[in-house]
Amino acid sequence: MTMYRDVIDGDKLKRLLPDLPDDLSDIRLEIFVREFSDDTAKIEEVLQKIKKRVGRTSYLGKEKEVFFFESDELNDDMRKPLISKLKELGYTADLKEGARGNVVITLSWKNS
């Protein structure tokens, strides 16, 4: 999978992406472009489930949550990219192999 990185003015990117927020169109941005694959779609699906549950948990004042996945639900190739995405979003993520092949992700964050 090929990836491309570049720095671009926000106003140039705004021409391509009209929905880009105004605060991003006034500054220089670092962008990453990579191919969208089936694995990326699966990672995004898992990420949405995690973010939804974190939203409910943080509303209750908690700053930590543990997630359990079956090994077939989160295969080896998806684990590292998922943890990277979680860290990009500002979470502290720890991945461990659980009993019977389960994958355990411990997620921490700071409520503001």
Image (cartoon, helix red, strand yellow):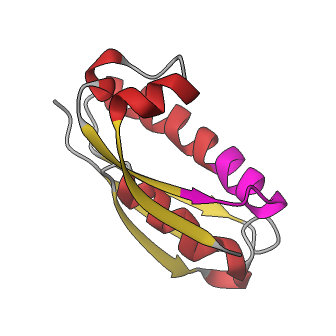
Residue 87 position, x and y percent, is: 37, 60
Residue most extreme to the left: 112
Q: How far from the left and from the top, in percent, is residue 46?
A: 66, 50
Decide: is 38 above or below 51. below
Q: Nearer the viewer, residue 8 or 52?
A: 8
Residue 96 in the magenta stretch? The answer is no
In the displayed structure image, the side of residue 94 where residue 35 appears, left or right: right
**Based on the displayed image, in which of its 4 quarters is residue 21 positioned?**
top left
Q: Is residue 64 left or right of residue 97?
A: left
Residue 28, horizontal then vertical, whole percent:
26, 41
Q: Which residues are magenta?
A: 33-46
- Asked if residue 60 can be seen in this view, the reply is no
The answer to whether 33 appears left or right of 28 in the picture is right
For the point 45% across and 23% down, the residue is 20
Quarter of the rendering containing residue 25: top left
Name the magenta segment's main secondary structure.
Answer: helix
How far across and down, in percent of the image, does residue 60 sit?
32, 26
Q: Quadrant of the N terminus?
A: bottom right
Look at 74% across and 55% down and name the residue there: 36
Q: Residue at x 48, y 74 (%)?
A: 95
Taking depth in this image into account, of 68 and 95 the one nearest to the observer is 95
Assess whether residue 43 is covered by the magenta stretch.
Answer: yes
